[in-house]
């Protein structure tokens, strides 16, 4: 089987480094390392063309985009990359490469699957129902499955994963009392809510790329007088070391006036990475996050947008070492169910399931 993954953005500093880009990179890598007969290509777009083979059964292809908008890339070379594919797996629904790939898949008789990761750009798919050209949706959570686009609702939830060999359990059941936020530093992540909740004397490390300079400036103002440091260019090994020392990861996703997180947090990769290091998670009980964190077993869930609730959860972890130890061990155990190997196996099973006509409109 030859599988071609198509992503509008590549995983690299010259493009975008976020959960969506990491998701595609890790899934393709894991799929290429299964014991099944699968050759994998990961096609994305950038300012210059490049291709290499990081693994024997994985080719990474970057096509030079003719556009400047990273979420609306275009290259006629995509047509050639998709020829001969048995499966085309597109990542992001409302982007031009998915529209092109879905149409080509239909014309050449190739199965096409789409996993929406929450991003979007200009595409004819806003006017034309491209779901009629795809075999099925592969949403990354039950929450993501609720908002499937188009009339075609065939689906199979594949979830996300974590590299358990890279994000390893801490050496001892202890912490340094610090908190972490891990992710893109943007308003929809709710870092301002966390700063409002931060108890005096508790250290917070905010880790991730700052995609909104004005929002970062406002956070620095809010953090004045608090023990807060911002880190934007840490390596995975540095992040792992911090997670292995931290008391908790706090993921304070807010909601809009209707109580919805929208297309944010379709799957919380930062959560499972922290949990794999034995770092309990304090998270908003919204979007996909309750599918990952088991309340009082691997972390604590709190109402969204309520600093007092976050502060109370932090206080519980600080004041109850037995609870913290239970959650730390439970977090690692929970993370082990989200390995990339399992996500890849679920994808491969879905490819075959729908090719046999056994797909469901409500599979999960």
Image: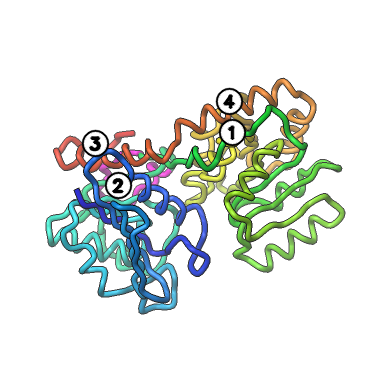
Residue at 44%, 70% in the rendered image: 70
Kindly identify which residue carries mark 4.
330
**Outermost front residue:** 56
Which numbered disc flags the more N-terminal residue, 2 or 4?
2
Q: Is residue 151 magenta?
A: yes
- Residue 226 location (% of width, % of height): 84, 51
- Could you tell whether 180 is left or right of 8 in the image? right
Graded by Cα atoms within 10 Å as few (under 14), some (14 to 19) or many (20 or more), the crowding at tag 4 reads: many
75 lies left or right of 86: right
From which residue to which does the magenta span run? 144-157
Which residue was labeled with disc 1?
A: 169
Could you tell me which residue is drawn at 30 percent across and 61 percent down? Answer: 98
Give whichever of discs 2 and 1 has the lower sequence position: 2
User: For residue 72: magenta?
Assistant: no
Q: Are marks 3 and 4 in contact (CB under 8 Å)?
A: no
Chain-order first, disc 3 or disc 1: 1
For the residues labelled 2 and 4, the Cα–Cα distance comes to 31 Å
Task: Identify the secondary structure beneath mark 2.
Answer: strand
Q: Position of residue 342 (x, y in %)?
A: 37, 36
């Amino acid at each position: 089987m030859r599988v071609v993954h198509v992503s509008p953005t590549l995983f690299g500093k010259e493009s975008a480094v976020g959960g969506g880009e990491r998701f595609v990179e890790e899934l393709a890598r894991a799929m290429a390392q299964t014991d099944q007969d699968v050759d994998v290509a990961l096609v994305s777009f950038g300012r210059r063309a490049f291709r290499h083979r990081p693994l024997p059964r994985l080719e990474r292809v970057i096509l030079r985009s003719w556009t400047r908008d990273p979420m609306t890339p275009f290259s006629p070379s995509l047509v050639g990359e998709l020829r001969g594919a048995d499966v085309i797996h597109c990542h992001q629904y409302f982007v031009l490469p998915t529209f092109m790939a879905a149409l080509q898949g239909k014309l050449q008789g190739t199965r096409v699957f789409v996993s929406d990761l929450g991003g979007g750009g200009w595409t004819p798919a806003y006017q034309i129902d491209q779901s009629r050209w795809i075999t099925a949706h592969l949403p990354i959570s039950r929450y993501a499955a609720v908002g499937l686009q188009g009339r075609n609702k065939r689906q199979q939830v594949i979830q996300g994963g974590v590299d358990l060999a890279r994000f390893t359990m801490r050496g001892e059941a202890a912490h340094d009392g610090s908190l972490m936020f891990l992710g893109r530093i943007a308003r929809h992540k709710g870092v301002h809510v966390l700063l409002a909740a931060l108890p005096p004397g508790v250290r917070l490390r905010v880790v991730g790329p700052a995609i909104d300079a004005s929002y970062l400036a406002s956070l620095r103002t809010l953090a004045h007088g608090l023990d807060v440091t911002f880190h934007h260019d840490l390596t995975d090994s540095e992040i792992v070391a911090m997670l292995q020392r931290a008391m908790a990861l706090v993921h304070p996703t807010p909601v809009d006036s209707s109580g919805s997180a929208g297309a944010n947090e379709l799957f919380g990769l930062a959560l499972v990475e922290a949990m794999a290091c034995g770092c309990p998670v304090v998270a908003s009980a919204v979007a996909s996050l309750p599918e990952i964190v088991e309340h009082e077993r691997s972390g604590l869930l709190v109402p969204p947008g309520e600093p007092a609730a976050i502060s109370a959860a932090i206080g519980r972890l600080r004041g109850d070492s037995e609870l913290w130890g239970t959650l730390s061990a439970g977090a690692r155990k929970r993370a082990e169910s989200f390995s990339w190997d399992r996500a890849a196996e679920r994808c491969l099973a879905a490819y075959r399931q729908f090719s046999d006509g056994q797909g469901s409109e409500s599979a999960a």
